[in-house]
Each structure stands twice: as C-alpha cells, then as structure tokens.
Image (cartoon, grey):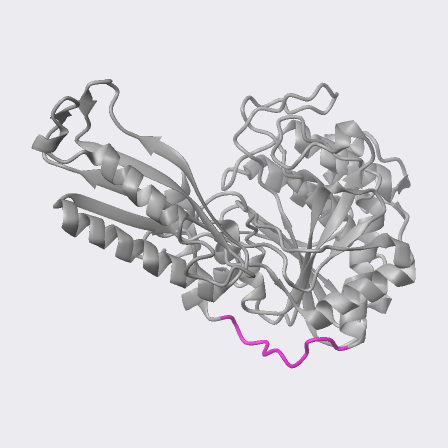
Amino acid sequence: MLSTVSPNDPDLLPDPIADIVGEEQSLAQVLIGVRRHLHKHPEVGMDEHDTSRFIRRTLEGYGLDVHGPIAGTGLYVDIEGDGTGSAVGYRADIDALPTQDQKRVPYRSQIPNVAHLCGHDAHTAIAVGVALALDANRSAIDGRVRVFFQPNEEGLPSGAPLMIRAGVLEGLNGVYGVHVDPKLDVGKYGLIEGPVTAASDRFEVKIRQEGTGHSARPHEGTDTVWVASQLMNQFYQLTDRVTDPRNPSILTVTMLEGSDAHNVIPEQAAFGGTLRTVSSEDRETIRAHMRRATQRLKEVHSVHVELDFEDGSPPVINDKTALRNVADTIREIFGDQAIHEIPQSSMGGEDFAHYLQHVPGAFIRVGTASGPETSYPLHHHRFDLDETPLAPTARLMARVLINHLEQGLTEAVASAPPDLATADNGRSDGQQRASSSEDSSERRH
C-alpha cells in the first residue's frame, strides 16, 4: 500500500509540511513531519485551534475534503470507494497534556507547561496517513471510510461524547483506533479481546462542620479530618470485598485538604481521587457502597458530608470480530511475530470507549519502544517515541478498514444515529447534561 505521496496543491500545505515535501515524498517523512510539528506546538483539550487548522491544511493540500469543525475543534474526512458497501470509521485524538516537556530534542514542546506526553501527536499523524493511504486506494474501498480527529480525550467532559452528539458515528457500523505503547517494542502490535482499559471515574468528598475547632479539644465539635480519614479507610476496603476480586478494580485517593494550621481543626476537610473498574456492574456496586458509607458517617457524626462523582469513560471493550480482522491483517502484512497478546486489561482510562457503546470496533496498541529514550511511560515528562512505526501503522489500519468493508463485518449493526441520551460523560451527580456540544465546549474553558 501507499509508500509515497504527492500533494495535489502544495500551496495549501502548511509551511512545516511544504518545507519537506517535494514533488513526491515518502509517507514516512510526511508523517514524521506532522508528528514533530504537533509535538512542538501542543494544545490542551478544547483549545486545539491551531492543531485543527494544521490538520485541515495538510489534508486539503493532498486533495481531501475536510468537514468541520465539529464538537469544538474536531474534524473528519470521508473517503468514498468505488463500491457500494457500508461505512466504517477511524478515530484519532489531538489534544496534549497540561504539563512540562523536559526532553532535549529539536522537536521539544515550545509551549510552556503543555506537552504531547501521551502520544496524541503520533495518533494524529497516523490518522493523516490512514486518510492518505485510503485516498490512494479508493478502488479497493467497498463503501466509505470516515477518518475523524477528536478533541479533548484527556479532559472532562471528554471529546468523544461531543463528537458522537455532533453525528460523527451516523451511518458507521464499526470504528477502530490505536494508542502508542512505550512498553512494546517497535514492530509489535498489542491485542486483547474484551476489556482493554478500565472505566475511570473521579470522586470528591467534602466534610463540613459549623466553625473551626481547637486541636486540644476535638470532643467539643466534629473533627472533620478524622471523619475524612474514617471514610477514606472505608473506601479503600471496598474493592475486592464487595466485588469479585477476579475483576480488577482500583480506588485511589490522590487529593487531601484540611487546615493550614497545626492546632486548628478545619471547618471543612476534603479528599478526592479516582475509581477504576473493568466491569460496569462493579462500577455501580462500589459507587453504591461509597454512597452508603458516606450517609452512615453523616448520620453518626451529625456532620454535613457531600460525595460527588464525575463520570469518566466506561471501559473500552474490543469486539471479537473486529479484533480478529485486525489480527488477520497484521499477520497478512507483518506475520505472526508482530502480534503481542496483551495478558490483562489496563486500568487506565480511554474515551474511545464511548464510540464502542454505539458501534463495535477494536482498539489496539502500537509498539514504539526501541531503547531507553523511547521507553519512558505515558505522561512521563521525558516521554518520546520511535517514529518508525508511524507509516507502517497507517498503512496497516487503512488495510484493516478496507478489509472490514470487503468482508462486510458488523453489518448487522443499525446505521441509525446513536442514542444521544447516553452520549455524555463528565458530570457530577445532580448536574444537568450538556444540551449541545457547543455548550459543553464553552464550559470546558
């Protein structure tokens, strides 16, 4: 499949790509150029305006019609084939993290305290490559492929529900995506059937009394910090005690606030963290027990206690048929040795899960490690990747999409618009759901 590219209109290309593209250039060089430009100029979720413009100009320079913006800064391209089959989608996320890049490389982030330390710049470059490869092979496409670029994977409310609400899945009967993996060697693709990642929800607890107290006389009021510690201990004991321990679940407290003085019992104490589960049933069971524990302490100590949840993404659940398509395509192109069977689910969160609640699909890991400098974990301040897999992965996923249409996979799925009532996340209990993607975008910043 496609190894070189030629722009239809070089004048439309953004300067960083036009500078490296002659009349014909290797796909690998173009995608490395895309990735490095984005790495130098990262933007956080819902503020990816320059990123969105750069993606648009790059694709338009190669003759593709770009639709959007949708869901704030999202974009998509439709590649129509010569056949009359169904439609399938491919997704990339485009946002960066609000943290400092501490690498010493020419393409290091030029934006203070913003960096692509989760590989979304590589995901975007691969998606550009998927679109270019499909465009060059329209005669092999039995239907239509939609390649879309999603904002704000890292934040809440995240971008996937906003893209769904904007209609990006309408007419699609499947969707695919990838994530770079610094724990996997270059040339390896990580596959797992069923849960790939966990649901990731945030929680926050506030304990409040009327007025402050003296640390020498805690019995004269309510010790808010002591109540908080009792509740934290109860929360920590829930996982593997109220749910099946064979299903992973993790509750972690990461935030704790109290008094600024050693001898003052604060009027309010607060703590928060995350709850991660791979089972939707366990997710609700643990949350119900957290609510009951909160209510009991509130009644016993006559203190005001609030527990709020901010819904994160549900688990990513790979579809068996879609995953088999990926595995077969990897074997066809690279051989059996390229497949790495992932032994267990990640407890990290990924909002690609929202798409899979509406259409089946698969989410795979791409090995990007080739030495110490490309083996730092995701979100590490020195995270980097070997760029060698960018073009091969783009060609692989283009072939996966073509095979999906050619084989008529998941065509039993209805092509009606998804149920938008469930296409949401990132709300605390009692909060109203956003009425539109634009409203949600405005509230994000």
Q: Which residue lies furthest to the left in this view?
A: 220
Vertical position of residue 231 compared to residue 430: above or below: above
Secondary structure mainly formed by the magenta segment: loop
Is 410 magenta? The answer is yes
Residue 102, quarter of picture: top right
Give the left or right position of residue 308, taking residue 374 as reference.
Answer: left
Is 132 magenta? The answer is no
Q: Which residue lies furthest to the bottom in this view?
A: 412
Q: Which of 240 and 369 is in front in this view?
A: 240
Give the left or right position of residue 332, taking residue 308 as reference.
Answer: right
The location of residue 348, given as percent across then percent down, is 57, 47
Vertical position of residue 61 compared to residue 395: above or below: above
Residue stretch in magenta = 408-418
Residue 249 in sight from this viewpoint = yes
Residue 81 in sight from this viewpoint = no
Q: Which of 400 and 324 is in front in this view?
A: 324
Q: Quadrant of the C terminus?
A: top left
Number of numbered callouts drawn:
0
Residue in view at x 17 percent, y 31 percent: 267
Give the left or right position of residue 249, taking residue 434 as reference.
Answer: right
The location of residue 20, given as percent across then percent down, is 83, 31
Residue in view at x 70 percent, y 70 percent: 320
Residue 18, quarter of picture: top right
The location of residue 142, given as percent across then percent down, is 79, 73
Q: Quadrant of the N terminus?
A: bottom right
